[in-house]
Image (cartoon, rainbow, N blue to C red):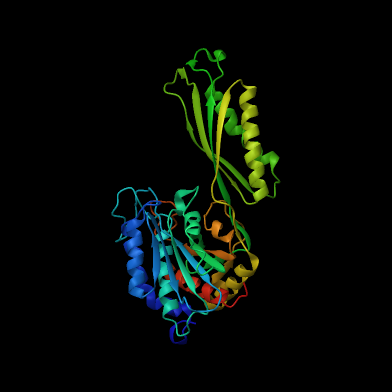
Amino acid sequence: MGRSGEGWIAAARRALPAMRAWRADFHREPELSLQEFRTREKITAALQELGIPYRTYDGFPGVVGLLAAQARGPVVALRADMDALPIVEETDLPFRSQVTGRMHACGHDVHLASLLGAASILGRADRAPAGPVKLLFQPAEEEGLSGGARPMIERGCLASPSVDYVVGQHVEPGLPLGTVGWKVGPLMAAADFFRISVRGRGGHAASPHQGPDAIVVASEIVGGLQVLVSRVRNPLDPVVVSVGSIHGGTKNNILPEEVVLEGTVRTLKPATRTLMRERLRRRVRSLAASLGARVRIEYSEGYPALINPPEATRAVARALTIELGRERVVEVPEPVMGAEDFARYLERVPGTFLQLGVGTSDRPASLHSPTFAPDERALVIGAAALAASAEALQHERP
C-alpha cells in the first residue's frame, strides 16, 4: 500500500507532476550508449532531492540508488535503461529533442521517470519496504553486444547488499495504454550478429566466367541462410536469420573482388543458439566453396534470451492484478524476437521483465520510430507496477 494506506496507483498519480518533469528533461537531452553522463547528473540530482543515497562510477555513467538499506527482508532491484538512439525526432512534443540526430525513440525516458517515481512513492509510503530496494539506472541497453547490464554487474550492482530479485519493464506499443504484460518463460530472444566477407575475382561484367563473382556468391548466401530456418531447426522453435546490410561494387560494369554481408540471428533456446552459430558457418563455407569463392566469417554473441522465472513472475502478476485489476494485467501469449540485456540480470538472480502498454489509436508509431511519443499516463502505471512488484517480491522466499 502507498502513503496513508492508499494504493500504488493513487500514490503514483500524486507523483505524476514530478515524473512528467523528469521525463521531459531526459527527453530534451538524449544521449547515446555509454555517453549518458548528463543523464547521470539529472538522475543523481533527482535522487538527492528525494533523499535517496546512491553511488556512481568513474568513467561509466551508471547509477545505483538504495532505499531502506537497514531493512531485513529480501533485496529487490528495480532497473531502468538510460540511452537514446541516433534518430532525428519528428514528434510535436513540447519537450522534443534539442540534440539533432538523437532521440528517445525507445521509451527509455519513460523508464527512467517511472523508476524515479517508484522510488519516490516507495520512500514515502506509510509502511516502509520490508527489505532494501536497489535502483539500477543502467546505460547502454541499445549497444547490442556487451550492453550496459554486464558492466553494471561487474561493478557490483547485484552485491552489497546481495540482490534476491530483479524487476524491469519496457514500453510496448502493442499493448493498450494502461495495461501491463507479463509472461513466464522466454519473453525476448538472444541476438547474435554476423559479418561475412565474400572474396571473388574482380573483373569486367562482360566476362563473368572469369569469376568467381562475389556478388553472385553473396546472393546465394543470402538465400541459402534461410534454409537454417526452414530445414535445420525444429519448426516449433522460433528462429530469425536476417541480412540487414550488403556492400560491394562501385560501377554497373565492374565485378567487385569483395562483397560484405551483415546480419543477425535471433533464437529463444541456448541449444538452438549454439546450433545456428555452427550451422551458419558450415552453410556459408559450403556455398562459397561450391562456387569457388573464399569467405571470412565473424560471429559475435550479443544479449542472451530473456527468460522469466515462473515463481517470481507469477508473484508479480498476482500483485499487479490486485493493484490494477484483472482487465489491465495481460498474459503475453508469444515471445518477441527483439533482444534486451536485462536478460543478463536474470541469468544471475530470479525476477521478471514486464511490458508497459503505451498503445493508443491516435499514436500508432512503433519503437525506434522518429514519431514515437508514449502518452504520459503510462508513467503512473509504470511507477505503480515497479512499486507493487518490489512489495510483492519482498514477501516471497528467495
| Front residue of this view, candidates 132 and 228 | 132
The x, y position of residue 202, in whole percent, is: 49, 17
Residue at 33 percent of width and 73 percent of height: 49
Residue 101 as seen in the image, left or right of residue 200: left
Residue 122: image quadrant is bottom left
Q: Residue at x 34, y 71 (%)?
A: 48
Query: Does 60 appear above or below 24?
Result: above
Left or right of 139: which side holds 261?
Answer: right
What residue is drawn where x is 53% and y is 39%?
Answer: 263
The single residue placed furthest to the bottom in the displayed view is 4
Q: For residue 218, say whether it is visible.
A: yes
Residue 331 coordinates in the image, percent (x, y): 60, 66
Horizontal and vertical percent for residue 391?
Answer: 53, 76
Q: Does any portion of residue 21 appear in the rendered image?
A: no
Quadrant housing residue 233: top right
Q: Nearer the viewer, residue 22 or 164?
A: 164
Front-most of residues 209 and 277: 277
The residue closer to the viewer here, 5 or 328, is 5
Above or below: residue 320 compared with residue 353:
below
- Image quadrant where one finds the C terminus: bottom right
253, above or below 341, in the image: above
Q: Give how far across and how far down residue 149 sits, in percent.
A: 49, 56
The number of callouts visible is 0
